[in-house]
Amino acid sequence: MEARTRVAWNLRRLRVERGLSQENLAVDADVDRSYISGMERQEFNPTVDLLDRLAAALDVDVGRLLEAPDVGAEAPKPLKSGRRPK
């Protein structure tokens, strides 16, 4: 599995596990929301500096963004769209 694919997989997995929208993660990592979306769709190749910021925003070591998924693991599901109840 390519590094870009691993980053996309793990970025979405970690973001969804934490209940973060792309918008919230983008704000925390100081990047545009559309760039988060593009990384999750493997359209963009993030810099090491951006990976550091994303890892910090997700409160994980940067290496977690490059981990290979377990064999047979299901692709991470997106969060439900729409606003969350307050």
Image: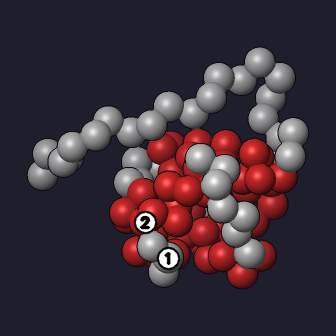
Q: Is residue 83 left or right of residue 20?
A: left
Residue 2 point in image, percent of width and height: 86, 46
Q: Which residue is mark 2?
A: 33
Q: Tell me, yes or no, if residue 14 can be seen here.
A: no
Question: Which type of secondary structure does the marked residue at label 2 adopt?
Answer: helix
Q: For the N terminus, which image quadrant? A: top right
Whether pointer 2 and pointer 1 mark residues with C-beta atoms closer than 8 Å, the reply is yes
On residue 61, the disc is: none
Residue at the spot 67% in from the left edge and 43% down from the top edge: 9
Which picture quadrant has residue 27? bottom left
Give the CA distance from mark 2 to mark 1. 6 Å
Residue type of the residue flagged with mark 1: Val
Neighbourhood count class around disc 1 (C-alpha, 10 Å): few under 14, some 14–19, many 20 upward: some
The colour scheme used here is secondary structure
Residue at the spot 77% in from the left edge and 46% down from the top edge: 6
On residue 31, the disc is: 1
